[in-house]
Image (spheres, helix red, strand yellow):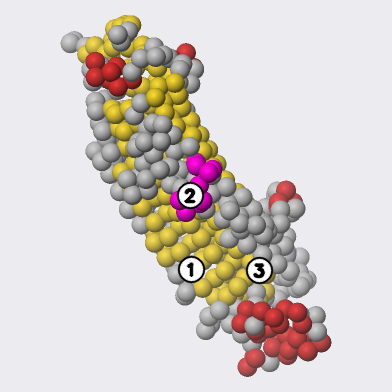
Amino acid sequence: MLSLMLALTLAGAGPGPALAAVLSVPSGTSINAAIARAHAGDTLLIEAGTYNERVVIDKPLTLQAKDQHHPVISAQGHGDTIRVNAADVKLTGLVVRDSGDNLTAQNAGIYVSPGAHRVHISECQLIANLFGIWVERVDDAHLLNNTITGRRDLQSAQRGNGIQVYDTRGVRVIGNHISTTRDGIYVDVSRDAEFRHNRIHHVRYGTHYMNTNHSIWEDNQVYLSRAGLALMEVRSLTVRRNISWGNTDHGIMLRTIQDSLIEDNIVAGNDRGLFVYDAEYNILRGNLVINNRTGVHLSAGSSNNEVDGNDFIGNREQVRFVAARDVEWGKQQGNYWSNYNGWDQNADGQGDIRYEANDLVDRLNWRYPLLKLLSASPALQTLRFAARQFPPLRAPSVVDRHPRMRPLSQNWKKWNDIAPRTDTN
């Protein structure tokens, strides 16, 4: 028989206070049975132990680990481990594991159904679920300081995402640690979201982020994955102080993005540091792009962006750019380019001749990669010299008219030993 210990606590103040119960759920009993007996606003303190059941929450409740222990809730490989069907539910300190593996059914460790607004999930460990947390058509969800580890036994394409956010407003995803899922955080058709202080590694994309405007990405770190931040078909984002390193494709992808601020990010040791595609009217400033194979891959008419005060250091190829006309960067204070060969005769901190990122030989190398075998040959060196001297042979390029002579970043040497990876996830 279900044993419940009941203690009444006062909720609220003033005349006619509402009464909420705090119910203890002992090990060996049923969480679902406790939910059935509870009333809206009650708190269930889950004692340490393993609960082999699929939990369904259909009223506003708090499910919380008792005495800082970590009770384990396991779906034993079937369906969702916890399904939240009511608004104002809080889950804290639980170990949630072993969901089903049906991608079509979107099996998740915690599945938050449409209309379950103001859900609060914190300090939980989600282990060996298909999707970690799935949030759909809710407002003001808070996902805080959870640890999510995916299905290591499945190939990347067969896994679910760590956190899936769809058609939401005001979601807050803060302080989560995500690994070995398909994508770390997948976001679509949402707005007014915040993603801060998340740590993501050994996934496909650190974030796969689409159609979500007026949002913030700050102080996140993505590393040792296939790709870092992928921000696509968006506008009005703030992307600040993120670190993306050691990824086998891009560090930060800016694809079909407008009216956004990308500043003070560190992009190190990736294949492509910044992948900028169809991006206009954005501000990129204060970023450190270091030791990538290609610092910036710029394409698809990405112009009218303000790119200033960035440091491009030690990239094997600073910019890959194919277009019909020059794109000017560094109009205010200039960017720093570690391969700049100019001088600063008046000692004002800016080069006296302009920096051009690419020339005709670079374009030939992109079109005919085997030409790199002849990169040190007198013929190619002569062609490079001639292209610089005769305007008809000059190729359009990213141009910085007054490049900085010294980096703005104070800690760039910390990232000097990070080299691009060659393996994939």
Mark 3 residue crowding within 10 angstroms, few (<14) / some (14–19) / many (20+):
many
Mark 1 residue crowding within 10 angstroms, few (<14) / some (14–19) / many (20+): some
Q: Is residue 240 at all visible to an observer of this figure? A: no
The mark nearer the N terminus, 3 or 1, is 1
Q: Quadrant of residue 256?
A: bottom left
Q: Nearer the viewer, mark 1 or mark 2?
A: 2
Give the residue pinned by disc 2. 182
**Residue type pointed to by label 2:** Arg
* Image: magenta residue range: 150-158
Residue occupying image coordinates x 44% and y 21% = 50
- Residue 392 placed where, x, y %? 63, 93
Q: Left or right: where does residue 32 sit relative to residue 266? A: left
Q: Earlier in the sequence, mark 3 or mark 2?
A: 2
The answer to whether residue 249 of the structure is visible from this angle is yes
| Predominant secondary structure, magenta span | loop
The answer to which of marks 1 and 2 sits earlier in the sequence is 2
**Distance from Cα at disc 1 to Cα at disc 2:** 23 Å
SS label for mark 3 = strand
C-alpha gap between disc 3 and disc 1:
16 Å
Distance between the alpha carbons at the discs numbered 3 and 2: 30 Å
Secondary element under disc 1, as helix, strand or loop, is strand
Q: Is residue 153 magenta?
A: yes
